[in-house]
Image (cartoon, rainbow, N blue to C red):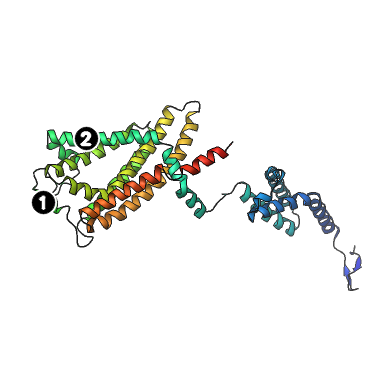
């Protein structure tokens, strides 16, 4: 049977489409008309959100967004199953992707996140583990004192506490001139650079381990801090015995006030996780670990940034400046970190706490 002959708008005769094509077109039109109003509303809401016009959205629109998204996603699935026309599929696919990003996607880009993180997020996370920081600081001070006292009583302890890389000319019995030479200003970045690189890799490894071992209720983190600071105590005794306490403190402070602070924060972050798991309170252990883990992860991002900055201080200022310049940089960095972590962003935190229900 031949298809009926129809005339188009120009008066030319052409064959009518087969009945199955007409039925599919009719079904597609009916499907689109039944749901078109919901799609248009979803597109309007998504469009305003993409343009940043959030204040123009009513409460009803905000509540309807996830419902409209799921409806559009369901319509897309049906359209694919029934092989509707390509234009409807393309439209729905684009609309569902845009709506998904607004419902489930990230609310800010990397630059905005970094600005918020450095603008108060990091300092708030660190203030949130203040108790663990106090405990870790006490352990680090105790480790330094223990290392000093052990070497003071028996010099053989020095070789057990201080790695071979440190014990080149820096050994008990070395003359004041030899020890002073190890702290001298370099004309270039050679000489002490290898020693600085070792310090950075050592402290970076200690920081990562101190955080990772916190899951064992924080005890290994504390032991690691104790052992690492005992090495510093032994070195401090060595230079004090030669009358070079100030020179050594200035040499160490350039990067030490940043690097040792980073180790302190890493150990406190690890211990915070372990303490939350050991004493979860009214929460489950998994919930307590998840909450403390998120806060600890924020702190560790800051620790990584601090270690990178400390490496730059080790590579140049420490080798190329005298005792006064080193001490000035060290004290300045210590004051900066204290102000940034424990004073910066407090007013904003109070405002957010008042605004939150």
Residue at point 25%, 37% (across, down): 227
Quadrant where the C terminus sits is top right
Describe residue 134's horizontal placement relative to residue 102 as left or right: left
Residue at point 43%, 44% (across, down): 123
Asked whether the residues under the numbered discs 1 and 2 touch, taking CB atoms below 8 Å apart as contact, a structural biologist would say no
Q: Position of residue 39 (x, y in %)?
A: 74, 51
Describe residue 112's horizontal placement relative to residue 216 as left or right: right
Rendered view: 301 above or below 141: below
Q: Is residue 193 visible?
A: no
Residue 276 in which image quadrant:
top left
Q: Position of residue 12 (x, y in %)?
A: 89, 73
Q: Position of residue 102 (x, y in %)?
A: 62, 49
| 3D distance between C-alphas at marks 1 and 2 | 25 Å
Name the residue tied to disc 2: 145
Q: Counting other residues with Cα less than 10 Å from the Cα at mark 2, is it few (<14), some (14-19), or many (20 or more)?
A: some
Between 311 and 357, which is closer to the camera in this rendering?
Answer: 357
Q: Is residue 265 visible?
A: yes
Describe residue 242's horizontal placement relative to residue 226 as left or right: left
Residue at point 18%, 43% (across, down): 235
Describe residue 27's horizontal placement relative to residue 147 as left or right: right
**Disc 2 element:** helix
Q: Which mark is residue 178?
A: 1
> Which one is earlier in the sequence, the residue at label 1 or at label 2?
2
Between 231 and 330, which is closer to the camera in this rendering?
Answer: 330
Residue at point 31%, 36% (across, down): 137
């Amino acid at each position: 049977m031949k298809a009926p002959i129809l005339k188009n708008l120009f008066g030319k005769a052409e064959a009518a489409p087969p009945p199955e094509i007409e039925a599919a077109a009719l079904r597609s039109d009916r499907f689109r008309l039944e749901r078109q109003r919901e799609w248009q509303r979803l597109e309007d809401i998504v469009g305003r959100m993409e343009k940043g016009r959030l204040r123009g959205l009513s409460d009803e629109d905000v509540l309807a967004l996830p419902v409209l998204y799921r409806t559009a996603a369901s319509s897309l699935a049906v359209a694919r199953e029934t092989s509707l026309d390509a234009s409807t599929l393309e439209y729905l696919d684009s609309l569902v992707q845009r709506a998904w990003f607004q419902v489930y996607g990230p609310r800010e880009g990397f630059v905005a996140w970094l600005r918020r993180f450095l603008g108060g997020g990091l300092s708030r996370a660190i203030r949130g583990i203040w108790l663990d920081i106090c405990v870790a600081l006490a352990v680090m001070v105790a480790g330094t004192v223990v290392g000093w006292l052990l070497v003071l009583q028996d010099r053989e302890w020095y070789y057990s506490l201080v790695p071979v890389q440190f014990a080149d000319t820096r050994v008990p019995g070395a003359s004041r001139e030899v020890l002073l030479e190890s702290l001298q200003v370099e004309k270039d970045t050679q000489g002490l650079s290898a020693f600085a690189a070792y310090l950075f890799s050592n402290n970076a490894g200690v920081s990562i381990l101190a955080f990772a071992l916190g899951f064992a209720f924080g005890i290994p983190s504390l032991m690691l801090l104790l052992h690492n600071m005992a090495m510093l105590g032994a070195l401090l005794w060595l230079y004090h015995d030669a009358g070079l306490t100030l020179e050594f403190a200035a040499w160490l402070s350039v990067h030490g006030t940043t690097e040792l602070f980073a180790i302190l924060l890493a150990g406190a972050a690890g211990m915070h996780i372990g303490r939350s798991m050991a004493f979860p309170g009214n929460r489950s252990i998994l919930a307590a670990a998840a909450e403390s883990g998120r806060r600890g992860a924020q702190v560790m991002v800051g620790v990584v940034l601090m270690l990178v900055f400390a490496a730059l201080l080790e590579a140049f200022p420490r080798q190329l400046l005298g005792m006064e310049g080193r001490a000035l940089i060290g004290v300045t960095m210590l004051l900066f970190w204290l102000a940034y972590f424990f004073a910066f962003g407090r007013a904003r935190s109070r405002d957010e706490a008042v605004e939150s229900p």
